[in-house]
Image (tube, rainbow, N blue to C red):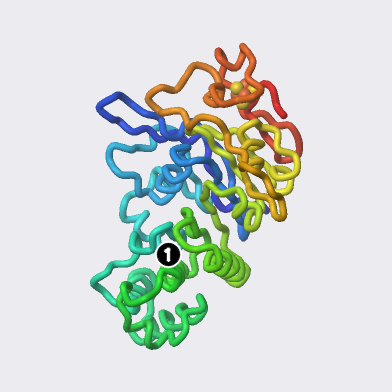
């Protein structure tokens, strides 16, 4: 039996702007395995969050899925009605964000918001929902959960708000969690605690996670599989060991070189030269050509296809590392 929970095939997301159609995600395909964590990596603007919003059916106008499919447990989410998506969101698929206030409403107590989420998706009484909410606050490590149940979001510290958001996202036992830069806005010690918490909750609830980040250091700690995106396309896919020990795409290589190494004293950390190419000026050929140390003439004319180079390892490049 297949262990694939979510399968994205040739997904294209286009924003119909005044400047013309901008393809923020351009024909990407990958799969997420049940109970595993996939790290979706790349700099800002490479299409990671747009992909996640497409999965959730939360793309804002003028963004649209213009091609491809997103199959979740056999059902194509791109063909679902809004009602069907509402039944899936927050229930079977959940999302946590960099900024907890994206998910938490400042005018309602934490408990009210948790109860509401549970009552919307589960056939339980108000008392059962309340008990479940308090239990979830306890599970995510919030001290005095009965008291915090009555608190408003602004009465919690940043780290506690992050935990409350995770409690809300997990309150209906989702099979799939999308975590969009969940540790970027919090300090390093809390970051480690939140990562540990997510890993222990994943084991406990056996859910799959798509972990979106620009930080490869974080990905190396949490991921089973890694997808590296650049300017709306996938440049490399492999299991985490292969990505970190045998990267083949020059962009992946550059991202790994940019990770601060323990006990390594260097005057200046490596950074990939230049910035991500703008969607309004996508060049002919490879999108990474202007930043690539390995660029060939061919790269300026032809766009490289994602090609298998080994077991589960695919790379889109004419001149690999
Ligand atoms: S295809 Fe060419 S420009 Fe693109 S990453 Fe590979 S070597 Fe660099």
Q: Quadrant of residue 50?
A: top left
Q: Position of residue 22 (x, y in %)?
A: 36, 28
Determine crowd level at label 1: few under 14, some 14-19, many 20+ residues with C-alpha closer than 10 A. many
Please tell me which residue lies in front, 292 or 315. Answer: 292
Q: Position of residue 236 (x, y in %)?
A: 63, 36
Q: Nearer the viewer, residue 103 or 205?
A: 103
Q: Is residue 193 left or right of residue 75?
A: right
- Name the quadrant where ligand 1 sits: top right
From this viewpoint, is residue 119 visible?
A: yes
Q: Residue furthest front?
A: 267
Q: Residue at x 61, y 33 (%)?
A: 251
Q: Quadrant of residue 7?
A: top right
Label count reads 1
- In the rendered structure, the answer to whether residue 68 lies left or right of residue 216 reads left
Horizontal side, residue 315 vs residue 285: left or right: right
Name the residue located 28 percent from the left edge and 30 percent from the top edge. 17
Measured as percent of width and height from the top left, residue 13 is found at: 40, 35
Q: Position of residue 317 (x, y in %)?
A: 64, 25
Vertical placement of residue 68 versus 161, above or below = above
Above-or-below relation of 283 to 213: above
Q: Helix or strand or loop: what does disc 1 sit on?
A: loop
> Does residue 304 appear in this view?
no
Q: Decide if ligand 1 comes within 8 Å of the CB at mark 1.
A: no
Q: Which residue is mark 1?
A: 91
**Considering only vertical position in the picture, is 186 above or below 214?**
below
Residue at the location (52% across, 42% down)?
Answer: 8
Which of the image's four quarters has the C terminus?
top right
Depicted 299 relative to depicted 36: above or below: above
């Amino acid at each position: 039996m297949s262990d694939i929970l979510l399968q994205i095939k040739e997904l294209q997301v286009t924003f119909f702007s005044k400047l013309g159609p901008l393809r923020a995600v351009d024909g990407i395909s990958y799969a997420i395995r049940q109970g595993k964590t996939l790290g979706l990596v790349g700099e800002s603007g490479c299409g990671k969050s747009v992909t996640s919003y497409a999965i959730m059916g939360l793309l804002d106008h003028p963004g649209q899925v213009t091609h491809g499919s997103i199959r979740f447990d056999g059902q194509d989410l791109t063909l679902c009605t809004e009602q069907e998506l509402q039944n899936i969101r927050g229930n079977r698929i959940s999302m946590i964000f960099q900024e907890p206030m994206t998910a938490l409403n400042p005018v309602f107590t934490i408990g009210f918001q948790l109860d509401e989420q549970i009552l919307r998706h589960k056939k339980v009484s108000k008392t059962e929902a309340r008990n479940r909410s308090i239990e979830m606050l306890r599970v995510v490590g919030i001290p005095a959960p009965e008291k915090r149940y009555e608190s408003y979001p602004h009465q919690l510290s940043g780290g506690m708000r992050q935990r409350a958001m995770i409690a809300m996202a997990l309150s209906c036992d989702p099979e799939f969690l999308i975590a969009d830069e969940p540790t970027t806005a919090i300090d390093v010690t809390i970051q480690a605690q939140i990562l540990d918490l997510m890993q222990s909750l994943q084991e406990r609830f056996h859910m799959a996670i798509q972990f979106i980040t620009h930080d490869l250091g974080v990905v190396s700690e949490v991921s089973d599989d890694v997808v590296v995106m650049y300017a709306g396309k996938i440049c490399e896919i492999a299991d985490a060991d292969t990505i970190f020990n045998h990267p083949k795409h020059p962009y992946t290589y550059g991202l790994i070189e940019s990770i601060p190494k323990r006990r390594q004293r260097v005057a200046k950390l490596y950074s990939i030269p230049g910035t991500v190419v703008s969607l309004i000026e996508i060049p002919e050929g490879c999108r990474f050509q202007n930043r690539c140390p390995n660029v060939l003439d061919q790269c300026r004319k032809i766009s490289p296809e994602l090609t298998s180079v080994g077991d589960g390892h695919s790379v889109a490049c004419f001149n690999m590392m």
